[in-house]
Image (spheres, rainbow, N blue to C red):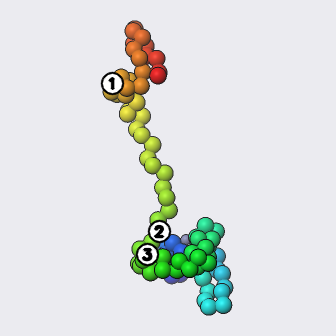
Amino acid sequence: MDKIPCAHCQLLYSPHALKAVQTPEQNLYFCCAGCESVYFLLHSLELENFYEKLGNKTLEPITSPKAPLKTHYDTPQFLQAFSTPLGGGCWRWL
Ligand SMILES: [Zn+2]
């Protein structure tokens, strides 16, 4: 089955994964309530040209930044910056 784009983010989804919304002008499909809300908010504020500026691009979901590697905390630079040596291999965190 062909995928179709969400009316707001333009990411492609299987039709069964999208919510269909019928307006007087057209049938719209949204991947989530957030996309649906933003789409109608932009139209209510007459900011439809957002989609013209978006062109063929998609709106990728925000991803969490990668967690720093554990090895980052084991470096002498990290210990020096965030702790005080107490001697005997012990450190006090600032
Ligand atoms: Zn979407």
Secondary structure under the numbered disc 1 in the rendered image? helix
Point out residue 67 in the picture as x, y percentages from the top left corner: 45, 43
Number of other residues with Cα within 10 Å of mark 2, as a class: few under 14, some 14 to 19, many 20 or more: few
Quadrant of res 45: bottom right
Q: CA distance from mark 1 to mark 2?
A: 41 Å
Q: Residue type at mark 3: give it.
A: Leu
In three-dimensional space, the C-alpha distance between marks 2 and 3, rounded to whole angstroms, equals 9 Å
Relative to 4, say whether 92 is above or below.
Answer: above
The amino acid type, in three-letter code, at marker 1 is Pro
Mark 2 sits near ligand 1, with its Cβ under 8 Å away: yes
In percent of width and height, residue 14 lies at 55, 76
The residue that mark 2 highlights is 59
What number is the disc on residue 76?
A: 1
Marked residue nearer the N-terminal end (2 or 3) = 3
Say if mark 2 contacts mark 3, CB within 8 Å. yes
Q: In this rendering, is residue 26 above or below 84? A: below
